[in-house]
Image (cartoon, grey):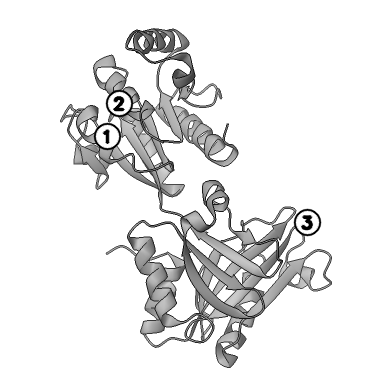
Amino acid sequence: MTMKTDPPELALDWHCAGRGVALATVVQTWGSAPRQAGSQMVIDATGAMAGSVSGGCVEGAVVTEAVEAIANGQQRLLHFGVSDDDAFAVGLACGGEIKVLVEPVGTVIPLETLRELVARRARGEAVAYVTGLHSGGPELRSGDAFPERFRRDQSGIEVDAKTFVCVHNPPLRLVIVGAVHIAQCLVPMAQACGYNISVIDPRPAFASPDRFGDVDLHDAWPQDVLAQMMRDGRTAVVTLAHDPKIDDPAIMAALQADVFYIGCLGSKRTHAKRLARLTQAGWDTAQLTRIHGPVGLPIGGRQPAEIAISIMAELTQVLRKGT
């Protein structure tokens, strides 16, 4: 049985189990605050908690405030920072500042709103949770209401300084073509970073549950299954088979899709040959510049795990900086 760790889903479960519950959400940060806006934790009336709003330095204070908020049914906007004499009491002495909004479920957050949020997230929808910092009254809106926030995956306070938008994007997806040793190392790293994983390899001995556990495996040619996996711009494709018969069709399919990253394993010489083949197949230079090859940041990795680290580093760089 998989333990639930998602704060909105946990908040719903705990509330339905009869526990008084509040959601605490980071709404704004400055300096070296360890968690970004939108980070959440759930707290019940006894002080039990899951998730986090910092690196552990303010959770105790947030729990205390949340228990009191649950008791009186009112939201609270908390501020922690080194400019505040209370900051050192809660341990935030590293130069960062954060604001945390605490919202009890059932009073400030209507139960039906929380149910709908959990259901829409489960369906993989992009949904914005929008609420007042001082007056509450949350509502849900579609992702196209805040296109730039959803593109950058950036929750935050609007220019009116009164409204907070919490971005709930669909999970990131990583499609790995080539069930090789590097892929075995890359899968758990990507999962730890929040990616849903699919692995494709037409060779049954490679795409084996014995090698990848319960990962979404496809013993098929990439061109037959890849299109249905590249659903949106939150998808990345990495080819690791090092065999043009497997990799090239996957690359061409990815080039036709709105994926945010395409990475291909191989030396500079191998990549030059790859680009020549794709050019001959009709792809122009502008299209081919989308391909990151050789895949990964140049950290000098040689072992499969080291190469996987370089791939995750480059994926993260592209996702967060758009470079």
> Picture coordinates of residue 66 (x, y %)?
59, 81
Say left or right for 162 vs 200. Answer: right
Marks 2/3 in contact by CB < 8 Å: the verdict is no
Residue at 38 percent across and 10 percent down: it is 279
Marks 1/2 in contact by CB < 8 Å: the verdict is yes
Q: Secondary structure at mark 3?
A: loop
Can residue 9 be spotted in the picture?
Answer: no
> Picture coordinates of residue 220 (x, y %)?
17, 31
Q: Which residue is mark 1?
A: 226
Q: Earlier in the sequence, mark 1 or mark 3?
A: 3
**Gap between marks 1 and 2, in whole Å?**
7 Å
Q: Quadrant of the N terminus?
A: bottom left
Q: Secondary structure at mark 2?
A: helix
What amino acid does circle 2 point to? Ala
Q: Earlier in the sequence, mark 1 or mark 2?
A: 1
Q: Where is 26 relative to 194, above or below? A: below
Mark 1 Cα shell of 10 Å, populated few (<14), some (14-19), many (≥20): many
**Gap between marks 1 and 3, in whole Å?**
45 Å
What amino acid does circle 3 point to? Gly
Foreground label between 1 and 3: 1
